[in-house]
Amino acid sequence: MHHGLFWKFHGARAITGAFGQRIIPIIKNDMNLFAYHLPLDAHPTVGNAAMLGKKLGLTEQFPFGDFKGCPTGIKGKLSHPMTAKQLEETLKSILNHNVILASPDNSRSINTLGIITGGANSDWHLAVKANLDAYITGEISEHDWHESQENNIHMFAGGHHATEQFGIQELMKKTQEHFNIECFYIDSKNPA
């Protein structure tokens, strides 16, 4: 599991109702449930951002982002510069998901970008601070759509789930190779 079950915004939760229907079978069957959220987003070789960057042909990948002093994604240089419109289409194809583009000029060339997968929609300002051309994440809010463009950066939102699928798939592959155990990936039809 990527995100885990208990988050601050939920508060303390009883294991009842719909939530209980998801959790009780795990408890009754004495199963372990392991969540690996931010470390998997940020891991430099098997992380969600690193793997998306690899699929985009990003070179010279370096840690990027800041959550309590730790990087949460990667930044790098595209091996072949693209316009914002071309990058939007490439992302749609890689993610198999609609992409929202906030761009000051979608015909302008992009050479450098930062990636923080999932719900890091307000971190586009870190890409501006790092002097990057573009920023990719999963979600976008109305004010970030406006403010990113006003700050002259291209922002791409490719879906929370869609941007966070490649790291776990790579980790699964590495785990199978290293430990010789069976692993499987369960996709979600989550449109967010």
Image (spheres, grey):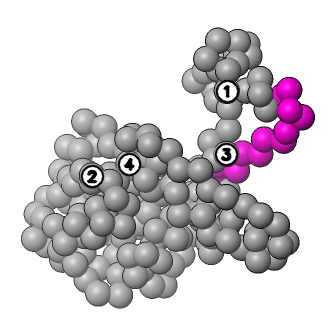
Amino acid on which the number 2 mark rests in the picture? Asn
- Main secondary-structure element of the magenta-colored stretch: loop
Residue 25 magenta: no
Q: Residues within 10 Å of mark 4 (few under 14, many from 20)?
A: many
Q: Is residue 135 visible?
A: no
Nearest the viewer among 167 and 131 is: 167
Q: Earlier in the sequence, mark 1 or mark 3?
A: 3
Report x, y in % for residue 85. Answer: 16, 67
Q: Where does the magenta region start and end?
A: 27-38
Q: Residue 129's image quarter?
A: bottom left
> Dot 4: what SS?
loop
Which mark, by number, is residue 159? 4
Q: Nearer the viewer, mark 1 or mark 3?
A: 1
Nearest the viewer among 125 and 182 is: 182
Report x, y in % for residue 176. Answer: 76, 71
Nearest the viewer among 138 and 109 is: 138
Quadrant assignment for the N terminus: top right
Residue hosting label 1 = 22
Report x, y in % for residue 39. Answer: 67, 57
Is 183 displayed left or right of 167 in the figure? Answer: right
Q: Earlier in the sequence, mark 4 or mark 3?
A: 3
Q: Is residue 113 above or below residue 28?
A: below
Q: Earlier in the sequence, mark 4 or mark 2?
A: 2
Which mark, by number, is residue 98? 2
Residue hosting label 3 = 1
Amino acid on which the number 4 mark rests in the picture? Gly
